[in-house]
Image (cartoon, rainbow, N blue to C red):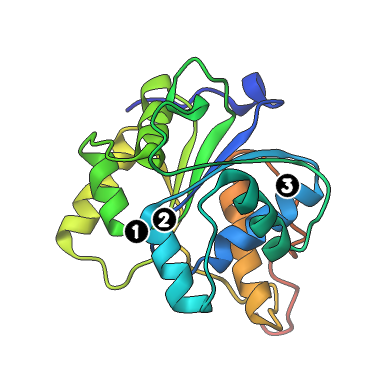
Amino acid sequence: MTQATPVSSSASAPLILGITGASGLIYAVRALKFLLAADYAVEVVASKAAHMVWQAEEKTRMPVEPMQQEQFWREQAGVETGGKLRCHPWGDVGATIASGSFRARGMVVMPCSMSTVGKIAAGLSSDLLERAADVQLKEGRPLVLVPRETPFSLIHLRNLTALAEAGARIVPAIPAWYHRPQSIEDLVDFVVARVLDQLAIDCVPLRRWEGHLPSDGL
C-alpha cells in the first residue's frame, strides 16, 4: 500500500479542493468558509458537472472565469477577506496543480461523484480535477475523497477499494449525532471537520467525542 507523505513536510503549502458534480456542494462551501477564515491557502478546481449541478440545486450560475469564480466562492462562504484563494478552469490541464513539481499539502475532493471516483481509480485524467488527484497519488501526497452517493454498487465499492489501496483516504459524507447538531450546517460541519482531520487541519469548531459519562447501574 502506498504511504502518503507526512503532512508536516508541506504544512505551509496550499490545499487543493476539487469540487465535482455530486449533489451536496454545501460541503465545499463550508470547507472554504473555515479554511479561508483560518487563513489557509486553497486552490480550487470545480468540474464541468459541478457547474451544472450548482445551477440545478441553487438556481444560480457559477462563473467560469477564475477571478469571478474566486469572488463567487468567497460570497458563498461568507469570507470576503482572509486566506488565499485561487480558482482554476476545469479544462486547464496546464495549470500549476497539474504538475507534481507544484508543492501542495494534499487534495480534498468534496463532494466526489462516482464518475470521478471511477476515473481516478482507473488513472484517467480527462480534466484538471482528475489530473490533480492523480498527481497526489503518484507523488505520495494525501488525497481525501468524500463520496456522496447511496447506495454503493459493487463497482463503486471496488473503485473505492482500489483508491484506498493506492493510498487515498475515503471519508463518506456521513454525519454523526453525538455532537448534538441543531441545524443542517452542524451536520455538514461534522463531515468537513473529519475530512480536514485527515490532513491535520483543525479549523472547524466541533464538539468531539469525549467518551461515555458515568451512569448508575451500568
Counting residues from the start of the chain, the first of labels 2 and 3 encountered is 2
What label sits on residue 143 in the rendered view? none
Horizontal side of 74 relative to 2 (left or right) equals: right
Residue 167 shows up from this direction:
no
Crowdedness near tag 2: few (<14), some (14–19) or many (≥20) residues, C-alpha within 10 Å: many
Contact? badges 2 and 3 (CB < 8 Å): no
Secondary structure under the numbered disc 3 in the rendered image: loop
Question: Residue 138 location, x and y as percent?
Answer: 36, 23
Residue 4 shows up from this direction:
yes
Secondary structure under the numbered disc 1 in the rendered image: loop
Contact? badges 2 and 1 (CB < 8 Å): yes
Pair 3/1: label in front? 1
Rendered residue at 41%/69% (across/down): 53
Contact? badges 3 and 1 (CB < 8 Å): no
State the residue position of label 2. 20
- Residue lying farthest to the top in this orientation: 101
Q: Three-letter amino acid code at disc 3?
A: Asp
State the residue position of label 1. 113
Q: Foreground: 6 or 88? A: 88
Query: How many numbered marks have been drawn onto this rendered protein structure?
Result: 3
Q: Three-letter amino acid code at disc 2?
A: Thr
Horizontal side of 165 relative to 83 (left or right) equals: left
Crowdedness near tag 1: few (<14), some (14–19) or many (≥20) residues, C-alpha within 10 Å: many
In terms of image quadrants, where is residue 216?
A: bottom right
Rendered residue at 62%/61% (across/down): 29
Q: Foreground: 81 or 38? A: 81
Tell me the quadrant of the picture where the N terminus can be found: top left
Pair 2/3: label in front? 2
Q: Three-letter amino acid code at disc 1?
A: Ser
